[in-house]
Image: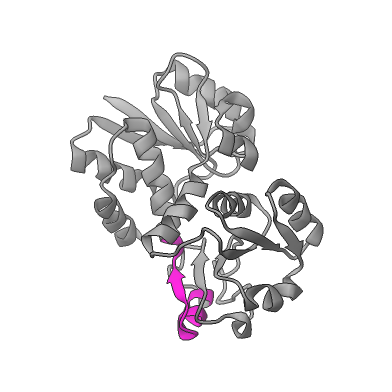
Amino acid sequence: MDVYGLMGNPVGHSLSPPMHEAAYDELDVDARYVTFEPDDAGAAIEAARTLGVRGLNVTIPFKEDALAHVEPDDLAARIGAVNTIDFRDDATPTGHNTDAEGVRRSFERHDVALDGRTAVVVGAGGAARAAAFALSDAGATVRIANRTVSRAQSLADDVPGATADGLDALADLLADADALVNATSVGMEEDRSPVPKGALHGDLAVLDAVYRPVETRLLREAAECGATTIDGAWMLLYQGVAAFELWTGRSAPVERMNAVLRRRL
């Protein structure tokens, strides 16, 4: 039996175990998905390799720390964070960032083209970095808006062609934008939106990385404007799909994983 898992602290709330277990059941894969709450990323990664764990997802607070203990691929190195580790070879574990793939596939699922388009990312943290690189690599011009402009500028400096602004510039940035990603936690705990409703319009595709609640205020107001709306559960789903496919070399049962995920939300 192969063992995969999730490393983070805390991870008791995670929806990754039922999502991955559903994939194993659907494809008759002899595997289990378990969770770990270590104190140290490096020690946990080494212990997982010693124990024969085949793959790990990595979540808060270890995504950046894990980078130093794996051989990152190009995307993970550019983002500066790892959320998926592959132990299948005897060499140094490889590190990947499937959060970016989650963003790209979420737009693809909703038939939203990104190449040659303009995309606005709200936020400048880890989720924003993954989103910004995903959008840029897909051919979009990226505009980053954040409460602290210096953090937005730091991210923009790393993303080819990206620009940085404060949140007060959102109306201007969105006027001719094609896509919007909320990569902040605004809307998770309170019925709030990081984007003024008046800045939204029907030509936008709006992805909110928040998945609890599934329908955030941002998505409700975007729908009222006629925009295409993409809830954060799609991003969560597709980062897991990408990890499953990396580890197993098989096409993931996306619809089964999605059904199980949404039943748990």
Asked if 2 appears above or below 61 in the picture, the reply is above
Q: Residue at (32%, 48%) from the top-left corner?
A: 19
Q: In the shown orientation, is residue 153 left or right of residue 95? A: right
Q: Nearer the viewer, residue 187 or 205?
A: 205
How many numbered marks are there?
0
What x and y, as percent, mark residue 227? 47, 78
Extreme-front residue of the structure:
116
Q: Quadrant of the N terminus?
A: top left
Vertical position of residue 89 compared to residue 137: above or below: above
Q: Nearer the viewer, residue 115 or 205?
A: 115
Q: Is residue 132 magenta?
A: no
Q: Is residue 11 left or right of residue 165?
A: left
Q: Residue at the location (64% across, 78% down)?
A: 175
Question: Quarter-wise, where is residue 108 in the image?
Answer: bottom left
Residue 103, percent across and down?
49, 54
- Residue 58, given in percent of the width and then of the height, sits at 51, 38
Image quadrant holding the C terminus, namely bottom left
Q: Residue at x 63, y 74 (%)?
A: 174
60, above or below 187, in the image:
above
Task: Please give left or right for residue 37 compared with residue 246 in the image.
Answer: right
Q: Nearer the viewer, residue 98 or 19?
A: 98
Q: Is residue 80 visible?
A: no
Asked if residue 209 shows in the view, the reply is yes
Q: From the viewer's side, name the closer residue of 201 and 24.
A: 201
Q: Is residue 225 magenta?
A: yes
Where residue 179 appears, x then y in whole percent? 54, 67
Where 219 sits versus 45, above or below?
below
Q: Residue furthest top?
A: 90
Q: Magenta stretch?
A: 218-233
